[in-house]
Image (tube, rainbow, N blue to C red):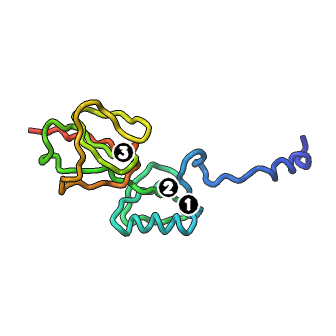
């Protein structure tokens, strides 16, 4: 096939949005919309953690971020947290469901539809002053009680 014959097919190809980012939700900073840039920068200004990935290398935390057009950035989202010292020793796990409600579990719960489930006792965390909801997706919210080191 000659170049002249192939040219109409080549013109129909869509350009890649990034060098190695096909199939992921991350785009180079320079390709983000104004609103996406504002959201990312606001997250950082408000005390959130932002990771940066340049073309070669892994994700790292730079403070402040460089905000380079050819780098990737993502928010580091926080899981829910609590002062486990004030939680009954019978509870070993904590997770938030899709509705935003967070519960303590005796045994490790499993994801079911839009919630975490376990047949043993559980309790809501509403009454704990030390509870912080976090901002991660509910599917990533499972937290295990840390082990006490002597």
**Residue in view at x 47 percent, y 54 percent:** 53
Which mark is on residue 54?
A: 2
User: Of label 2 and label 3, which has the lower sequence position?
Assistant: 2
Q: Is residue 114 left or right of residue 109?
A: right
In front: label 2 or label 3: 3
| Mark 3, secondary structure of its residue | loop
| Mark 2, secondary structure of its residue | loop
Q: Position of residue 78 (x, y in %)?
A: 33, 53
Crowd rating for badge 3 (residues with CA inside 10 Å; few <14, some 14–19, many 20+)? many
Mark 2 vs mark 3, CA separation in Å = 34 Å
Which mark is on residue 97?
A: 3
Q: Quadrant of the N terminus?
A: top right
Give the total number of marks visible in the rendering: 3
Q: Do the residues bearing badges 1 and 2 touch, measured as CB atoms within 8 Å?
A: yes
In front: label 1 or label 3: 3
**Residue in view at x 46 percent, y 63 percent:** 40
Crowd rating for badge 2 (residues with CA inside 10 Å; few <14, some 14–19, many 20+)? some
Mark 1 vs mark 2, CA separation in Å = 7 Å
Disc 1: which residue: 70
User: Of label 1 and label 2, which has the lower sequence position?
Assistant: 2
**Residue in view at x 42 percent, y 57 percent:** 75
**Residue in view at x 42 percent, y 68 percent:** 42
């Amino acid at each position: 096939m000659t170049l002249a014959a192939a040219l109409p097919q080549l013109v129909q190809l869509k350009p890649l949005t990034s060098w190695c980012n096909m199939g992921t939700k991350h785009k180079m900073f320079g390709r983000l919309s104004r609103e996406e840039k504002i959201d990312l920068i606001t997250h950082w200004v408000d005390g959130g953690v932002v990771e940066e990935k340049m073309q070669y290398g892994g994700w790292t935390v730079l403070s402040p971020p460089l905000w380079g057009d050819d780098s990737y950035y993502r928010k580091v989202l926080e899981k829910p947290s609590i002062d486990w010292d004030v939680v009954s020793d019978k509870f070993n796990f904590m997770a938030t469901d899709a509705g935003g409600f967070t519960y303590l579990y005796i045994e490790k719960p499993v994801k079911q539809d839009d919630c975490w489930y376990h047949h043993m006792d559980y309790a809501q965390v509403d009454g704990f002053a030390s509870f912080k909801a976090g901002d991660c997706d509910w599917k990533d919210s499972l937290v295990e009680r840390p082990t006490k080191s002597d």
